[in-house]
Structures are given as C-alpha cells and as structure tokens.
Image (cartoon, helix red, strand yellow):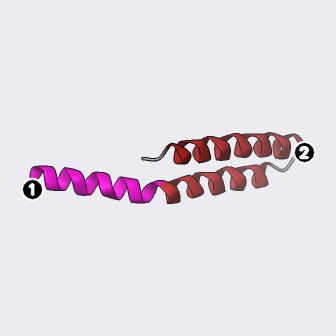
Amino acid sequence: MDINLIFRIAAVGILVSVLCQVLKHSGREEHAFLTSMAGLLLVLYWLIPYIYDLFQTIRDLFAL
C-alpha cells in the first residue's frame, strides 16, 4: 500500500468534513449527506483493488 493513498484518504476526509459543516450551517442537510456519501464512495473506489488483492492473497495462502 502506498503512503500517497493514505494522504489522499486523509485529504478527502478533511475536505468532506469541512464541506459538510458549511452545508449544515447553511441549512442544506441533504447536500451535506450527499457530499459525505460521495466522499465515502470515492475512498471505497480507491480501496477496491487493495481489498481484492487481500482476498486473493488469503485465497492463495489457504489454496482454496
């Protein structure tokens, strides 16, 4: 796993939390929710290859 991925995830988390706070204080709770969901989906999209490799390694380890 690359250290840049961890920094990107942290940056997305900070950005999403700031945007959600601004949107909630302006009365747009729906947009804040959609922003947090978009951030979550973006991070999951980045993590899917690593999760796939993890399951492949476990599968190869136990020879299933």
User: Is residue 18 toward the left or the right of residue 3 in the image?
Assistant: right
Image coordinates of residue 14 in percent, x first then y, are 70, 40
Q: Is residue 2 above or below residue 49?
A: above
11 drawn magenta: no
Q: Amino acid at mark 2?
A: Ser
Which residue in the protein does label 1 denote? Answer: 63
Q: Amino acid at mark 1?
A: Ala
54 drawn magenta: yes
Q: Main secondary structure of the magenta part?
A: helix
Which SS class for mark 1?
A: loop
Q: Which residue is most to the right?
A: 26
Q: Name the residue nearer the viewer: 64 or 27.
A: 64
The residue shown at (85%, 42%) is: 22
Task: Report if the CB atoms under discs 1 and 2 are less than 8 Å apart.
Answer: no
The residue shown at (79%, 46%) is: 19
Q: Which mark is residue 26?
A: 2
Q: Which mark is residue 3?
A: none
Quadrant where the C terminus sits is bottom left
Mark 1 or mark 2, which is nearer to you?
1
User: Is residue 44 toward the left or the right of residue 30 in the image?
Assistant: left
Q: State which tag comes first along the sequence, 1 or 2.
A: 2
Image coordinates of residue 53 in percent, x first then y, are 31, 56
The residue shown at (51%, 42%) is: 3
Characterize the local packing of mark 2: few (<14), some (14-19) or many (20 or more) Cα atoms within 10 angstroms: few
Q: Which range of residues does the magenta coloring cover?
A: 47-64
